[in-house]
Amino acid sequence: MDPLSKIPVTVITGFLGAGKTTLIRHLMQNPQGRRLAVLVNEFGSVGVDGEILKSCADEMCPEENIVELANGCICCTVADDFIPTIEALMALPQRPDHILIETSGLALPKPLLKAFDWPAIRSRITVDGVVALADAEAVAAGRFAPDVVAVEAQRAADESIDHETPLSEVFEDQIACADIVLLTKADLADAAAIAAARAVIEAEAPRRLPILAVEDGRIDPRLILGLNAAAEDDLASRPSHHDGAEDHEHDDFDTVVMELPEIADPEALKEAIARLAREQNILRVKGYVAVRDKPMRMLVQAVGERVRAQFDRPWGESPRATRLVVIAEHHDVDPDAIRAVLAPQDQEA
């Protein structure tokens, strides 16, 4: 790579649980000769996504090339976290050929693009493209409003109310900023749902965008890397609900970490997590679980009522402890109510 050329960066954005980490794992496993670096922005203090990616490290993306930022939304911590991290990646003994940035599910991509104009990095780095991931089944079902009936009731009662939920604004900003959209988990949606999701995205997009259906993050890297979009120079065509604002807040969302004893029944825990989505409007749960009499650590990732769990590696020297990050809109986060569902007496050690 020409040492004077700009390092291309791909920003991977998308709603909570859309499959960003799965996509990056696929790209790491299929680098096509590129030496990669990865920056992961977590919402919450348990670095699940970063650990998953570090377990996939190899010579084309060694562990030191995978960096986590867990101190808040990447677009809100530009000076303190993002710029120094990018500078450190560019100063690695072997300069990366391409940098992948996984934003948190709550991040707005446009403020991040603006950071690429900072004097410290603008001559050395460029946004090759913004890839937005959207869960096909969830988009088709219109789950961006946690309580659709309540929103419609508000619309009927007061025409002056802004009826969009914070979730819908995040989704719309991510689509508006994208160069390409991937409809993920297409194997879980039928043809009608995929068509409906395409229609929703096309209606929100400010310009015509490629929309590709993918399963398990599998896509030819040539379709999403090497776009040469220089997105930082194209901000005007990427409108945002927050244009004109000096910054933005994430007070609409909150996160709580649940520390629990060992569990006896993984299926009961999975059902409890699904209950949180049904009964308490919890959006996302992720973390590690200690299962009684099992030497392996169980990785849990949930989006709404869809819960996935797998044993990923032995605990080794790590303390056996169950720690789950729970994310929801601020008014839905009740730690005591969440704990009551996750840790009933019959599961405690």
Image: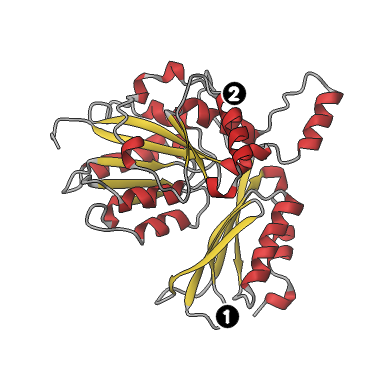
Residue 59 figure quarter:
bottom left
Query: Is residue 185 something that shows in the picture?
Result: no
- The label nearer to you, 1 versus 2, is 2
Q: Quadrant of the C terminus?
A: bottom right
**Relative to 34, is 336 on the left or the right?**
right
How crowded is the residue under tag 2: few (<14 C-alpha within 10 Å), some, or many (20+)? few
**Residue 42: image x %, image y %?**
47, 48
Please tell me which residue is depicted at 44% across the width and 48% down the height of the picture.
217
What is the residue that sits farthest to the top in this orientation?
236
Q: Amino acid at mark 2?
A: Ala
Residue 225, numbered label: none
Numbered disc 1: secondary structure? loop
Place residue 172 in its image quadrant. Answer: top right
- Which quadrant would the N terminus be assigned to in this image? top left
Residue 23 is at least partly visible in this image:
yes
Q: Is residue 142 above or below residue 228?
A: below
Total numbered circles: 2
- Establish if 319 lies above or below 65: below
As drawn, the label of residue 292 is 1
Q: Quadrant of residue 120?
A: top left
Left or right, residue 280 beside residue 324: right
Q: Position of residue 296 (x, y in %)?
A: 47, 75
Residues at marks 1 and 2 touching, judged by CB atoms closer than 8 Å: no
Where residue 70 appears, x then y in whole percent?
45, 49
Badge 2 marks a residue whose secondary structure is: helix
Q: For the residue marked with disc 1, what is the amino acid?
A: Arg
- Which residue in the structure is indicated by mark 2? 203
